[in-house]
Image: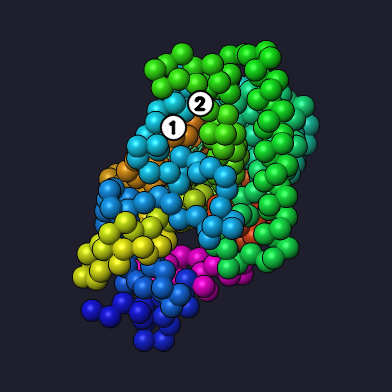
Amino acid sequence: MTTTSATPQHTAAELFAQALRHEHRPNPYPHYEQLLREPIARMDDGNWLATGHREISLLLRDPRISADRLPPPQQRPIRKSLLVEDPPKHDQLRQLVSRQFVPRVMGMRDHIDKLVTDLLDAHISEQPGHLDVVADLAYPLPVTVICELLGVPREDESLFGSLARRLTRGLDPIDTQTEDEIRELQETRAELQQYLEGLIARHDAAPGGDLLSGLMHSQHPEGPMDPIDLRVTLGLLLIAGHETTVNLIANGTLALLRHPDALARLRTDPDLATPLVEEVLRYDPPVQMSGRSTLADIDIAGTTIPKGSRIRLLLAAGNRDPQRFADPDRFVPDRADNAHLGFGGGIHYCIGATLARAEAQIALTALARRLASPGLVADPPPYRENAILRGPESLPVSFTRLSPDNGGA
Ligand code: HEM
């Protein structure tokens, strides 16, 4: 089977390049639909692209696949984070983080609820009014939560936020970045490392109940995390905790405003928030793609990906695979059987999934209940440059009334 052309007109590489163009950021899905005709495709540059749900799921769980898809040696960081590490090192790091992360996240719902209430209350005097759902809610909520969890002082939140925003661009395919951007990224990475060193020193002197103190002073058999791993892990949690949940809340708001029936149902039935957020993670996922490399020849979908190849896993395409999902382009807020790839799968499945779900469920329910006659000011809204962590730059929403509490419509 030939694997180079997705359609008679366009190769997979051409379609993928098109999908990555900023003008297609509001809706890359028609390109993904075409790419799905060839679930595993070889690109012109020798890299591979996986779009099928079945194929991505298999690759995510195959021990012959490495999570290391880092750039060439000169751009590699000093130490790999758990996101791009393989077992056994991956599993050790992940266990250390989970042990500190999971118990702190349990029981955070009330606090998140309070943060959402306060953020919305700031606009209560504006009737009729106007919110930028990104700047006023979707961005500050996860920033505050991740900073509190990690032990970043409140006064450093905006510095931390700006570092995270600048760093996420570095996750995009390297050939879409300019030399200036790559140089700026290196400077930002150095700035972050310096900040983290200072933060670690402060926590060493005065440990608190936060995750950073927990990682530094862990009494568990795996011992405290070594200082370099600690900095790298904090950097990963910072980006993962900032830039993904923002897009989940913004993409969810957008879906609700484009589907008024779903919005009306959520207003009266808060239980809908659980399946609805899963549907947002399928329909318009904040993390559009991930990457892997092969440690052996892999036979899949009638072709062989040779050892030493790099593979892009287009999670957002797998989420629209008609072989897996009925009516994949429809937003179905209570979709049953929703095994989406929004949080990945296998051993690298997102550690922050519970936290992100809680933040999005609470934020979307509050918006649905408290805003009367909400409407999109611009459709589509402007999108950020980022292709991998994809989401609106801003999301202006008008409303006639913002009800004072979370209890009434
Ligand atoms: C809507 C929000 C989020 C989405 C869509 C998301 C998505 C993902 C995805 C797709 C992966 C797998 C990447 C891969 O296999 O290559 C992942 C891994 C990860 N996520 Fe998230 N994430 C979100 C929020 C968070 C939050 C809030 C945190 C922590 C504060 C977090 C921490 C991590 C970490 C540490 C990993 C690496 C796990 C490993 O390699 O074992 N994520 N996330």
**Is residue 278 shown above or below 316?**
above
Marks 1 and 2 in Cβ contact (< 8 Å): yes
Place residue 377 in its image quadrant.
bottom right
The image's colouring method is rainbow
Q: Which mark is residue 93?
A: 1
Q: Within 10 angstroms of label 2, few (less than 14), some, or many (20 or more) residues?
A: many
Q: Quadrant of the C terminus?
A: top right
Amino acid type, mark 2: Met
The residue at 60%/67% (across/down) is: 176
Q: CA distance from mark 1 to mark 2?
A: 8 Å
Can residue 400 be seen here?
no
Place residue 353 in its image quadrant.
top left
- Residue 286 vs residue 186, the one in the foreground: 186
- Residue 127 vs residue 57, the one in the foreground: 57
Can residue 58 be seen here?
yes
Of labels 1 and 2, earlier in sequence is 1
The residue at 43%/51% (across/down) is: 68
Q: Position of residue 245 (x, y in %)?
A: 55, 40
Q: Which residues are magenta?
A: 17-36
Say left or right for 269 vs 163: left
**Is residue 304 shown above or below 181?**
below
The residue singled out by tag 2 in the image is 225
Q: Position of residue 374 (x, y in %)?
A: 63, 45
Place residue 6 in its image quadrant.
bottom left
Say left or right for 349 vs 383: left
